[in-house]
Amino acid sequence: MNLQRNVKPLFRCRKLKILSLSENEVIRLPSDIAHLTYLEELNLKGNDVSDLPEEIKNCIQLKILDLSSNPITRLPQTITQLTSMTSLGLNDISLTQMPHDIGHLRNLRSLEVRENLLRTVPPSISELNQLRRLDLGHNELDDLTLSPSFQPNEIGMLENLEELYVDQNDLEALPESIIQCRSLEQLDVSENKLMVLPDEIGDLEKLDDLTVAQNCLQVLPSSIGNNDIVTGRLKKLSILKADRNAITQLTPAIGSCHALTEIYLTENLLTEIPSSLGNLKSLRTLNLDKNQLKELPPTIGGCTSLSVLSLRDNLIEQLPLEIGRLENLRVLDVCNNRLNYLPFTVNVLFKLRALWLSENQSQAMLKLQTEQDPRTGIKVLTCYLLPQSNSQLVEQAPPSRSFIGGPKVHFGSDLEETHEDEENELGQFSRHDTPHPKPHSHAPKFKKQSIDGHIIHHDDDVNRELEPFFSGFIAVCCLQDPSEVCARHFP
């Protein structure tokens, strides 16, 4: 309902507690708002309000105020008299500065000022001791120092802060005091100009989600973990997004972050992965697209929960035999590498639903043939897309569509299949914007023990063939001449 001309009668309901006028083309609030002394929640999101009446100060019981997406350029100073307020939404209102005394809102738990024109943050924000969520993303901040004359631990005084978003700004550094925010669970500093992270970021022991994507980082601090892999520091860290940086080396300490379930390191300059990565038993998604990797450590087989492994656009010449230990792997993307063959142990990846060897691949799964490596005598797997030649890589001109920022692979829950389901044809996958598949929710039962419709029997012969791979057998790797590995340019 359009309330553009009918909003005033609402302000006669003097005992009104909740008033939601979002998306109603409201142009102005009448001064009669002073009568709503019982009002606890006011939602004006998505209107055409350009100014607030000073009388809003009379709404002394107001707890939630959302002014987002209005053409408001300034706030009345009286807004800081609403000391009962717990949530204030000021997203996308063309705000150039916050009230200097915003610290008077001592009960504020959530402050959102995303998508504005802020260049500074008022020092009094450090007085918001109850603040749990602070969103300053998509502004013009180049420094989080609140005032030169203020104590150097302004941000650190927000000891109860759990979520901090300062993404899409112009920050070149984070204040060291940020490590005093010991309650932080989510920290997003993506799309800035950060060269380094605070050395002691590992002190944020409650951190669950760390996003540092699209900066200028060359390394991640070793403090995120601990070289003693038994006693990691970020014990609760489950998501690490560090894609689109210039990271050349991944600290071995990452292997002590045992709670990690997702790691995104797309578009960096990594040439190797630390063997300690194999200690991450809970890791489900690992994206290493667009790096300079030549191999994976054999310890990758220790990531037994891994469901999505994306390695496209690297220089990988062979996969380790231990990849067969990834019993929960559903997606393996190795497009645009230098593979001559696949290890025979891929045969035992019974949950695999998508094996991408080329961007021109029409089906998610391929029919693989067994051959013998003439150099080593070891059984390997191959198909018409192998070996991946250099000419193939050059011809595949379209940029790879890596799933930066999170997986775009969604699988239906494993429902109990019927006999009728088993008659469905195997390998029917739909492919959309991402190169990874979205399988049918009712997959045939035999699909879990097959590759492209070919049943894999667990007979004695197969067991004998695989036994060397999982009993300490040392395989001779077939590597190309290192001189053939060309340098690649990463933006």
Image (tube, grey):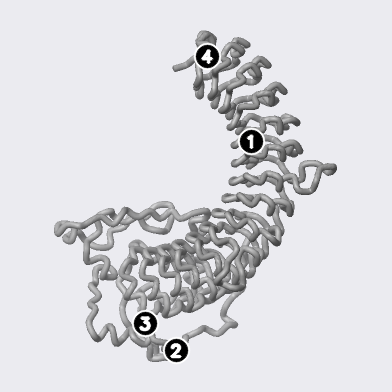
Residue toward you, 22 or 422: 22
**Identity, as a three-letter code, of the amino acid under mark 3:** Val
Location of residue 440 in the rendering, given as x and y in whole percent from the top left corner = 28, 54
| Quadrant in which the N terminus is drawn | top left
Q: Secondary structure at mark 1?
A: loop
| Residue at (54% x, 76% y) in the render | 275
Q: Secondary structure at mark 2?
A: loop
**Identity, as a three-letter code, of the amino acid under mark 2:** Ile
Q: Look at mark 1 in the image and give the residue it sits on.
A: 113
Q: Secondary structure at mark 4?
A: loop
Q: CA distance from mark 1 to mark 4?
A: 26 Å
Q: How many marks?
A: 4
Query: Which is in the foreground here, disc 3 or disc 4?
Result: 4
Q: CA distance from mark 3 to mark 4?
A: 71 Å
Q: CA distance from mark 2 to mark 1?
A: 58 Å
| Quadrant in which the C terminus is drawn | bottom right
- Answer left or right for 158 relative to 374: right
Task: Say which label, 3 or 4, has the lower sequence index.
Answer: 4
| Residue at (52% x, 14% y) in the render | 4
Location of residue 310 in the rendering, given as x and y in whole percent from the top left corner = 46, 64
Query: Which is in the foreground here, disc 1 or disc 4?
Result: 1
Q: Is residue 314 above or below residue 321?
A: above
Q: Look at mark 3 in the image and give the residue it sits on.
A: 380
